[in-house]
């Protein structure tokens, strides 16, 4: 049953992301209000619930009609004050459903892209650590076309991590993979959750996936937060 | 073997110089206009599209005549460019380059526009989330992905510029060593008795140059697309 959206005091940690947005998309109305702390917050709900629109708004790729978005006490968007930080200044990593690796760049250049764009000096230690963590160190010379679906998503995750994000958005990162390759990615994500102190928002409509990775669950339904809390929210979900 | 006289060599070299300069100057404008047509939303876009394609459908003599009126020493644009930059087009090789560039321009813009339209905009979004500002997105993602179209446009424009005749001869006449390109030279040789042999040699040169340009276009296009899409 869909309960009215209510602000939920979450169990632990300081608030990383606070958000209150409204957006009309054709006949679909999105009105969401929540706060998240560290760890992995799953945005869980059926397709069409507005999950992707929501993460696009956090990333700055979609502009809300009303409301505000605050990350680490920095206002990223505030309709009332006409603040709208463009995506390239938000420092939010985004792993897309389809990877979106740059086809004209090698894996190494893809991974290095965020660092180059921000003008930071090279950090080989960090690069090697993340390449090793994701098991992609042997793929660096390849072009994205030559990668399997699972490899491609791992590179996409590495690319987002290497830009040193303040928050990592993962939009159904396993959706484009077949069952075998899904199993190939999840352990890496769990490792990432346990080893890296980057708060993550994980979008999915598959309860089994969310159970493995999430620390907090935000259930979205028809453009609203239907429930927020711990993994117990998934008890009756498939 | 093909033995060209010094005058014929001059025409060949001049043709190549004019076509290269015309194509090089047209490129930045071609990318800008191609981008506007592919991505822009503004009033008068259809008019701009029409204007760009006009040289393709107008009789070349008309294009040449319009250039003469506007870019001649006394023409509004020509006078301005002369007063401020000391640039002269009328009866100079620079004028031949302008005429060839204008004639080749639609052939340059079209593939660039199509390539830009075919780009997956979501890749540009991805670049933005990785910290690339709009200018960097353009130069590191958009432009490289449009490269096959740019290469195709460049070669079409170059080939068109190399063969340009009507607009050039109308605008800057047919002056040996200054504006007499291969086409103009062939035309001249055909007007004089015993000119057939010289004309024939230049015809062979024209065919060879055109074939080389076509093969280069094919090869470069295939190379660029292999780079992106693997084998």
Image: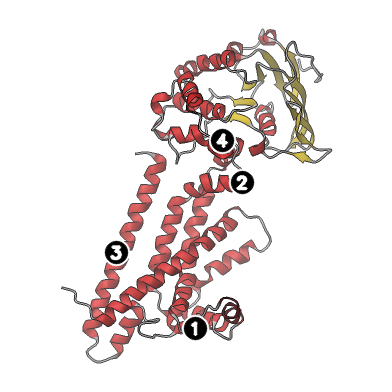
**Disc 1 designates what residue?**
B90
| Residue appearing at x 73%, y 11% in the figure | A12
**Disc 2 designates what residue?**
B134
**Chain where mark 3 sits:** B
**Chain where mark 1 sits:** B
Q: Nearer the viewer, mark 4 or mark 2?
A: 4
In this view, A238 is above or below A160 = above
Question: Which badge, 2 or 1, comes first in the chain's sequence?
Answer: 1
- Quarter of the N terminus of chain A within the rendering: top right
Question: Which badge, 2 or 3, comes first in the chain's sequence?
Answer: 2
Question: The residue tagged with tag 3: helix, strand or loop?
Answer: helix
**Chain where mark 4 sits:** A
Residue B92 seen in the current view: yes
Q: Position of residue A169 (x, y in %)?
A: 62, 26
Question: Which badge, 1 or 3, comes first in the chain's sequence?
Answer: 1
Cα distance between the residues tagged 2 and 3: 39 Å
**Disc 3 designates what residue?**
B211
Circle on res. A120: 4
Q: Nearer the viewer, mark 1 or mark 4?
A: 4
Asked whether the beta carbons under mark 1 and mark 3 sit within 8 Å of each other, the answer is: no
- Please state which of residues A171 and B3 is positioned toward the viewer in this rendering: B3
Give the mark count.
4
- Please state which of residues B124 and B110 is positioned toward the viewer in this rendering: B124
- Quarter of the C terminus of chain A within the rendering: top right
Mark 3 Cα-neighbour bin, 10 Å: few <14, some 14–19, many ≥20? few
Q: Nearer the viewer, mark 4 or mark 3?
A: 4
Mark 2 Cα-neighbour bin, 10 Å: few <14, some 14–19, many ≥20? some
């Amino acid at each position: 049953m869909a309960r009215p959206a209510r602000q939920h005091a979450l169990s632990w940690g300081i608030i990383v992301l606070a958000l209150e947005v409204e957006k009309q998309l054709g006949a679909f109305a999105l009105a969401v209000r929540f706060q998240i702390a560290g760890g992995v917050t799953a945005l869980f709900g059926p397709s069409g619930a507005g999950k992707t629109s929501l993460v696009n708004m956090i990333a700055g790729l979609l502009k809300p009609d009303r409301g505000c978005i605050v990350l680490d006490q920095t206002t990223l968007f505030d309709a009332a004050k006409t603040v709208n930080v463009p995506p390239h200044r938000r420092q939010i990593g985004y792993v897309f459903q389809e990877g979106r690796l740059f086809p004209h760049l090698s894996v190494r250049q893809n991974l290095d892209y965020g660092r180059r764009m921000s003008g930071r000096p090279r950090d080989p230690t960090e690069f090697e650590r993340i390449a090793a963590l994701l098991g992609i160190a042997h793929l660096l010379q390849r072009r994205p076309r030559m990668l399997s679906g699972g490899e491609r998503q791992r590179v996409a995750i590495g690319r987002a991590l290497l830009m040193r994000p303040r928050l990592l958005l993962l939009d159904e990162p396993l959706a484009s993979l077949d069952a075998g390759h899904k199993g190939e990615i999840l352990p890496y994500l769990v490792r990432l959750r346990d080893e890296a102190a980057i708060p993550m928002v994980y979008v999915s409509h598959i309860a089994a996936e969310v159970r493995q990775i999430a620390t907090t669950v935000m259930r979205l339904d028809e453009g609203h937060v239907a429930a927020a809390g711990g993994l117990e929210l998934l008890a009756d979900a498939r | 073997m093909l033995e060209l006289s010094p005058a014929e060599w001059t025409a060949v070299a001049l043709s190549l110089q004019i076509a290269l300069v015309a194509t090089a100057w047209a490129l930045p404008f071609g990318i800008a206009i191609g981008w506007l047509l592919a991505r822009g939303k503004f009033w008068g876009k259809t008019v701009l599209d029409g204007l760009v394609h006009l040289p393709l459908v107008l009789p070349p003599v008309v294009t040449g005549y319009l250039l003469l009126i506007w870019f001649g020493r006394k023409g509004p644009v020509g006078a301005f460019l002369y007063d401020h930059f000391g640039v002269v087009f009328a009866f100079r090789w620079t004028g031949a380059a302008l005429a060839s560039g204008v004639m080749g321009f639609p052939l340059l813009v079209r593939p660039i526009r199509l390539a830009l339209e075919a780009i997956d905009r979501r890749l540009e979004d991805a670049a933005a989330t990785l910290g690339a500002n709009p200018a960097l997105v353009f130069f590191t993602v958009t432009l490289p992905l449009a490269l096959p179209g740019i290469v195709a446009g460049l070669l079409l424009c170059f080939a068109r510029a190399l063969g340009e005749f009507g607009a050039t001869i109308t605008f800057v006449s047919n002056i040996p060593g200054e504006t007499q390109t291969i086409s103009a030279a062939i035309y001249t040789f055909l007007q004089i008795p015993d000119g057939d042999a010289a004309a024939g040699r230049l015809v062979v040169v024209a065919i060879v140059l055109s074939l080389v340009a076509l093969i280069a276009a094919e090869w470069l296009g295939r190379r660029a697309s292999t780079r992106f899409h693997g084998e």
